[in-house]
Structures are given as structure tokens and as C-alpha cells.
């Protein structure tokens, strides 16, 4: 079996907040500024797991267009097979978290 050389994810869960499954499509600007549509698989106040077709390099900065919050910047922590872990550059206000989840279609 050949090792995967383009992935940095090492299996260590470094989440500081619980995640909520959402499966929501949102617009995103890639690190090179190109627009893309991605699927947020799950989200927390400090990050998200996304599915995408484009390549996102580790440490690349992306910008989501989120309901309730507007523009949200995040850093790609790991990327593997069309999925990436994104850590938001600023924590989301907890008062906005439940309204955001509802806007993304989660049952809260």
C-alpha cells in the first residue's frame, strides 16, 4: 500500500468545541481568491469540516459567506480526498451560533 503524501491529517482530534452536523452548501473564496461552492459537513463555534472539489493547501486561508455572520475567514488545518478541516480565525459569538445552525438547516 502506497502512503498518502499530500495529506497532513494525523488523526488527532484537536477540537475545542462540539460539532453539529449540517450538510449545507455555502459560497467560499479559495486562498487564491477564486469562488467555489462547498458543503459544510459539520460546524462548531471554532471550525468546520467541509467537502469540496478544489484543492485547498494546508494553512491556506479561505473566506466563507455565511448566513447570519457574513464573511468568515478560516485556515485549512488538514485536507484529504476532497475534505478539509477549517479552523476559523476568530471564534464565533455564541449568541450567533444557534441562529447560524438554524439558517444552515440544522435541527436545534
Image (cartoon, grey):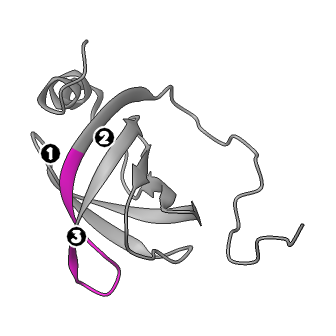
| Residue nearest the observer in this picture, 34 or 73 | 34
Apparent side of residue 59 relative to residue 72 in the rendered image (left or right): right
Q: Residue at x 76, y 45 (%)?
A: 12
Secondary structure found at label 2: loop
The verdict on residue 102 being magenta is: no
**Image: 97 above or below 75:** above
Q: Residue at x 68, y 77 (%)?
A: 6
Q: Position of residue 4 (x, y in %)?
A: 76, 71
Stretch in magenta: 25-35
Q: Residue at x 23, y 21 (%)?
A: 98
**Image: 17 above or below 90:** above
Q: Say which quarter of the image contains residue 24.
A: top left
Q: Residue at x 69, y 40 (%)?
A: 13
Q: Residue beneath label 1, please?
A: 69
Q: Identify the mark nearer the N-term, 1 or 3.
A: 3
The Cα atoms of the two marked residues, 3 and 2, are separated by 22 Å
Rate crowding at label 1 as few (under 14), some (14 to 19) or many (20 or more) other CA atoms within 10 Å.
some
Q: Nearer the viewer, mark 3 or mark 2?
A: 3
Secondary structure found at label 3: strand
Rate crowding at label 2 as few (under 14), some (14 to 19) or many (20 or more) other CA atoms within 10 Å.
some
Q: Residue beneath label 2, please?
A: 92
The answer to whether the residue labelled 2 contacts the one labelled 1, judged by CB atoms less than 8 Å apart, is yes
Q: Residue beneath label 3, please?
A: 36
Q: Position of residue 63 (x, y in %)?
A: 26, 66
**Image: 98 above or below 13:** above
The Cα atoms of the two marked residues, 2 and 1, are separated by 8 Å
Amino acid at each position: 500500500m502506497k502512503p498518502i503524501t499530500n495529506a497532513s491529517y494525523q488523526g488527532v482530534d484537536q477540537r475545542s468545541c462540539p460539532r453539529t452536523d449540517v450538510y449545507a452548501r455555502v459560497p467560499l473564496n479559495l486562498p487564491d481568491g477564486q469562488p467555489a461552492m462547498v458543503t459544510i459537513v459539520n460546524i462548531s463555534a471554532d471550525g468546520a469540516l467541509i467537502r469540496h472539489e478544489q484543492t485547498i493547501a494546508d494553512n491556506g486561508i479561505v473566506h466563507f459567506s455565511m448566513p447570519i455572520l457574513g464573511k468568515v475567514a478560516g485556515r485549512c488545518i488538514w485536507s484529504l480526498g476532497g475534505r478539509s478541516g477549517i479552523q476559523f480565525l476568530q471564534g464565533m459569538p455564541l449568541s450567533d451560533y444557534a441562529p447560524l445552525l438554524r439558517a444552515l438547516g440544522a435541527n436545534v
